[in-house]
Image (spheres, rainbow, N blue to C red):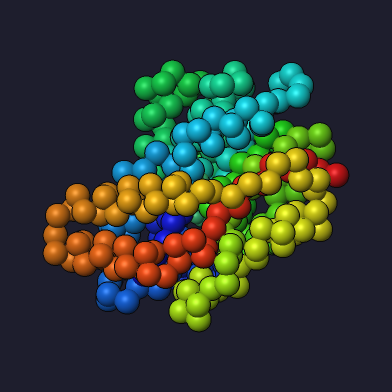
């Protein structure tokens, strides 16, 4: 089974990540690493955002992230196709950097930036976000906190990368209700929303905005994710999509949530 945000690589190569990164759970249908990469790439290619995020919430978050000074620069670590970063930079007329390890996503992001006429001010770097050490005013990390370990470790690392007076948009998996043993086995120990916000405070932030994805955002995300896989049109891809649908509808729907925090260094 597998849920939401999708790192398009095996988690075996990330020794410091939590038991199961959000977006990459265990699969009951046997799947080779090569097939898994293909499925995750197909799912990601069919998504605007690789997270349970509606266009309305994206617009609201971008409004809330408005720079409060001149010359602000954005930084999105684990930016996927770069859609949120580009909207942020377009809306506020600012420049930014996207960091994405997956070469395919990075290429898609660059093509999109060229098409939208922002490639002169939005730069995409195909590299490991864990090695990025240049702080920015507006930092974004959505569904990729596992780059640094668990959410608490991610928030500590992101505090170092957010300049004083700046803002961080952090979004990650949470439990909204008590998980079954199987869901916990799949997703590991996730905080609830209150604990996630407390991790942020402990890391040195003040929470400015705290929210969760709605069930409708989740349902759309899951459906669009599976539709990308269905397009591959093979029996194996269908079996993989079936497994995901079953895992969601009979398992983590309404149990695993996605928390959104806008934070500023205290
Ligand atoms: C769940 S996706 C979210 C993508 C994007 N933030 C969004 O919301 O659409 C997580 C992204 O993090 C990327 N990623 C994972 N580990 C990374 C690393 N160490 N450095 C840079 N990117 C990484 C994955 O390739 C994937 O695109």
Count all numbered tags in the image, as a single digit: 0
Residue at x 75% of width, y 49% of height? 159
Outermost residue toward the right? 266
**What residue do we see at 62% from left, 27% from top?**
63
Q: Where is residue 46 in the image (x, y as percent from the top left)?
A: 31, 44
- How far from the left and from the top, in percent, is residue 203? 79, 55
Can residue 147 be seen here? no
Residue drawn at x 53%, y 22% is 90
Relative depth, front residue between 35 and 219: 219
Q: Is residue 112 above or below residue 150?
A: above
- Of residue 101 and residue 77, the one placed in the foreground of this image is 77
| Residue 248 horizontal side relative to residue 56, left or right | left
The quarter in which the C terminus is drawn is top right
Q: Where is residue 91 in the image (x, y as percent from the top left)?
A: 56, 21
Task: Note whether residue 179 is visible.
Answer: yes
- Which quadrant holds residue 202? bottom right
Residue 47 is situated, as x and y percent measured from the top left of the image, at 36, 43
When the figure is inspected, residue 200 is found, relative to residue 86, above or below; the finding is below
When asked about the image quadrant of residue 64, the answer is: top right
Nearer to me, 255 or 224: 255
Q: Which residue is drawn at 38% across and 47% down?
A: 220
User: Which quadrant is home to the N terminus?
Assistant: bottom left
Left or right: 70 as drawn, with respect to 170: right
């Amino acid at each position: 089974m597998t849920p939401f945000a999708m790192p398009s690589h095996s988690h075996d190569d990330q020794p410091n990540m939590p038991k199961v990164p959000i977006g990459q759970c265990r699969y009951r249908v046997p799947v080779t690493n090569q097939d898994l990469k293909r499925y995750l790439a197909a799912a990601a290619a069919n998504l605007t955002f690789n997270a349970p995020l509606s266009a309305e919430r994206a617009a609201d978050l971008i409004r809330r992230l408005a720079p409060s000074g001149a010359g602000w620069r954005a930084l999105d670590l684990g930016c996927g196709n770069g859609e949120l970063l580009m909207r942020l930079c377009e809306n506020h007329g600012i420049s930014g950097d996207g960091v994405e390890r997956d070469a395919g996503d990075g290429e898609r992001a660059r093509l999109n930036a060229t098409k939208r006429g922002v490639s002169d001010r939005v730069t995409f770097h195909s590299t490991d976000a864990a090695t990025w050490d240049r702080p920015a005013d507006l930092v974004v990390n959505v569904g990729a906190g596992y780059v640094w370990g668990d959410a608490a470790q991610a928030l500590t690392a992101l505090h170092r990368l957010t300049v004083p007076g700046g803002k961080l948009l952090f979004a990650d998996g949470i439990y909204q209700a008590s998980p079954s043993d199987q869901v916990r086995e799949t997703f590991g120990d996730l905080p609830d929303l209150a604990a996630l916000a407390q991790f942020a405070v402990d890391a040195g932030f003040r929470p400015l905005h705290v929210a969760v994805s709605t069930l409708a955002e989740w349902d759309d995300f899951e459906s669009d994710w599976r539709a990308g896989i269905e397009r591959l049109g093979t029996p194996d891809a269908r079996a993989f999509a079936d497994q995901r649908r079953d895992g969601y509808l009979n398992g983590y729907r309404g149990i695993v949530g996605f928390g959104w925090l806008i934070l500023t260094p205290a």
